[in-house]
């Protein structure tokens, strides 16, 4: 199951990147029909409760990603990047935008967890975010739970 989820996420990222490359650089920033794309980079820090331990283990990540939002504020989002202690990580989620707050639920294949994430304070160049993750399967993954706080920089705002 873990391998299937990981391969699915890699395939999804490949398809999205291929569509972006085919469109080229310019004003066309829509990859999914009916959705507007918002690219970002994100830095997170937090703690994980590892399997076999009840002691919190520190960690962090630096991610790149995109949020696709339609006119009804439905969200499809992906992220990928570097993390400690797992080295590589990624997320794939769906959600809803409520005014300036985004709420997303999804799956992280490495380390395997399901998550809920929300933005909670608008910053100068992006949003502060918080996420809580847990592992619903006792035989898959490295962690029981993860709590993260981070900052997401909006790349469109940053490049203007």
Image (tube, helix red, strand yellow):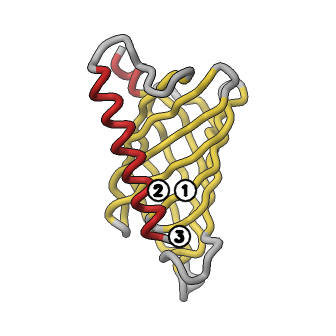
Could you give the CA–CA distance between mark 1 and mark 3, rounded to whole angstroms? Answer: 9 Å
CA–CA distance in space, label 1 to label 2: 6 Å
What x and y, as percent, mark residue 108? 51, 59
Q: Residue at x 43, y 53 (%)?
A: 9
| Tag of residue 48 | 3
Determine crowd level at label 2: few under 14, some 14-19, many 20+ residues with C-alpha closer than 10 A: some
- Read off the residue under disc 2: 45
Q: Secondary structure at mark 1?
A: strand
Considering only vertical position in the picture, is 67 above or below 44? above
| Badge number at residue 79 | none
Q: Earlier in the sequence, mark 1 or mark 2?
A: 2
The CA distance from mark 3 to mark 2 is 10 Å
What is the residue that sits farthest to the bottom in this orientation? 52
Q: Are marks 1 and 2 in contact (CB under 8 Å)?
A: yes
Q: Nearer the viewer, residue 133 or 106?
A: 106
In this view, the residue farthest toward the top is: 27
Q: Name the one closer to the observer, 69 or 130.
A: 69
Q: Work out which quarter of the rendered image holds the C terminus and state it.
A: top left
Q: Does the CB distance between marks 1 and 3 fall below 8 Å?
A: no
Q: Which mark is residue 148?
A: 1
- Which of the 4 quarters of the picture holds residue 94? top right
């Amino acid at each position: 199951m873990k391998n299937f989820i990981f391969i699915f996420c890699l395939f999804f990222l490949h398809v999205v990147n291929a569509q972006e490359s085919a469109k080229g650089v310019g004003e066309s920033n829509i990859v999914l029909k009916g959705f507007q794309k918002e690219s970002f980079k994100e830095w997170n820090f937090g703690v994980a409760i590892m399997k076999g331990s009840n002691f919190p283990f520190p960690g962090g990540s630096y991610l790149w990603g995109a949020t696709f939002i339609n006119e009804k504020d439905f969200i499809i989002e992906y992220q990928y990047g570097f993390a400690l202690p797992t080295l590589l990580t990624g997320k794939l989620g769906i959600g809803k935008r409520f005014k300036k707050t985004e709420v997303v639920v999804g799956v992280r294949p490495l380390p395997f967890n399901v998550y809920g994430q929300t933005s909670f304070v608008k910053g100068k160049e992006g949003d502060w975010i918080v996420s809580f993750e847990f592992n619903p399967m006792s035989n898959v993954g490295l962690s029981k739970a993860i709590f993260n706080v981070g900052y997401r920089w909006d790349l469109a705002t940053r490049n203007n």
